[in-house]
Amino acid sequence: MKNKRYFPMFVDLSDKNIVVVGGGNIATRRVKTLLQFTRNVTAVAPMMTPELVELGKTGMVNVLQRGVKHSDLTTAYMVIAATNDHKLNDEIYRVCKEEGIYVNIADDKEKCDFYFPGIFMQDELVVGITASGLDHKKARRVRLAIEQAMAEASEKD
């Protein structure tokens, strides 16, 4: 199947509820990125990285250290499933599709309403990079090249 193109859209998440299911390194990175755009992030997982637990203790993230419940998802604007349990990810995908919730299954590009981009931010500038779920290393290289180009441009200002 030919890879679909996703429209790059910048959305105000400041008042949107975001749920991240998972407590590992990928979930932690997603949460930390989202915190640059909203404080309405809930992380749900029975086990979490120490960093994610600490974000919960400081009040930066609503941490639910338990298994995910259907009710955790129903009030979300978008859900990111970053678990290593394919059956759970499939169930999260099914619920989100039924409820009309944007969903991203971190390890299955076919089950993503949106891709989670590599992000570079400087002052008012926000750049999002994606390789349509095909080549994460290439997207990272491009993000780093943009970061370097912006640093060089700032030196000239």
Image (cartoon, rainbow, N blue to C red):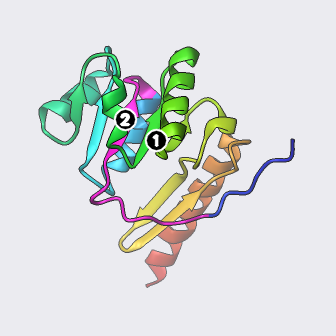
The x and y percentages for residue 9 are 54, 66
Q: Amino acid at mark 1?
A: Glu
Specify whether 23 is left or right of 152: left
Residue for badge 1: 99
Circles 1 and 2: CB atoms closer than 8 Å: yes
The x and y percentages for residue 19 are 36, 38
Q: Give me the C-alpha separation between circle 1 and circle 2.
A: 9 Å
Q: Quadrant of the N terminus?
A: top right
* Residue 28 seen in the current view: no
Name the residue rendered at 34%, 20% in the picture.
Answer: 45
- Exactly how many numbered labels are in the figure? 2
Q: Does 14 lie within the magenta span?
A: yes
The picture quadrant where one finds residue 86 is: top right
Q: Main secondary structure of the magenta part?
A: loop
- Which disc is residue 73 wearing? 2
Magenta stretch: give its range: 8-25
Name the residue rendered at 61%, 48% in the picture.
Answer: 140
Q: Amino acid at mark 2?
A: Leu
Q: Quadrant of the C terminus?
A: bottom left
The x and y percentages for residue 135 are 72, 42
Above or below, comparing residue 28 to residue 88 in the picture: below
